[in-house]
Image (tube, grey):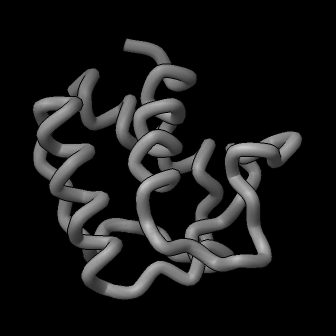
Amino acid sequence: MTQDEILKTLLDELYDLTVSTDIDLKNHAHPGSVKFEELRLDSLDTLMMAMNVEEKLDLELEVAEFPRDATLDEFAEYILELINQ
């Protein structure tokens, strides 16, 4: 699995969640540059995203590990490191 594939998985999950109306991930020029904090996900959406990503990528994530100030690219890189451990 590549970082781009992980990013796509994250984006697929985020498309279905209630994210900030200021950000259109589907039409964003560089969606990987968006920070989690900019998405303004509530705790339930964050938990649902984590559970769905865990299931799709067959790994365990702690919601507390979601770095609010990280970009989606940085988080995809972090997940890739977890997978490769």
Image quadrant occupied by the N terminus: top left
**In the picture shown, does residue 85 fall above or below 40?**
above
Name the residue rendered at 47%, 21% in the picture. 5
Name the residue rendered at 56%, 83% in the picture. 40
Q: How many marks?
A: 0
Image quadrant occupied by the C terminus: top left
Residue 61 location in percent, x, y?
19, 55
Taking depth in this image into account, of 31 and 66 the one nearest to the observer is 31
Name the residue rendered at 74%, 59% in the picture. 24
Residue 46 location in percent, x, y?
33, 72
Q: Is residue 11 left or right of residue 58?
A: right
Taking depth in this image into account, of 3 and 20 the one nearest to the observer is 20
Question: Which image quadrant for residue 63?
Answer: bottom left
Residue 84 location in percent, x, y?
27, 22
In this view, the residue farthest toward the right is 29
Taking depth in this image into account, of 8 and 21 the one nearest to the observer is 21
Question: Which image quadrant for residue 71?
Answer: bottom right
Name the residue rendered at 69%, 52% in the picture. 25
**In the picture shown, does residue 40 fall above or below 65?**
below
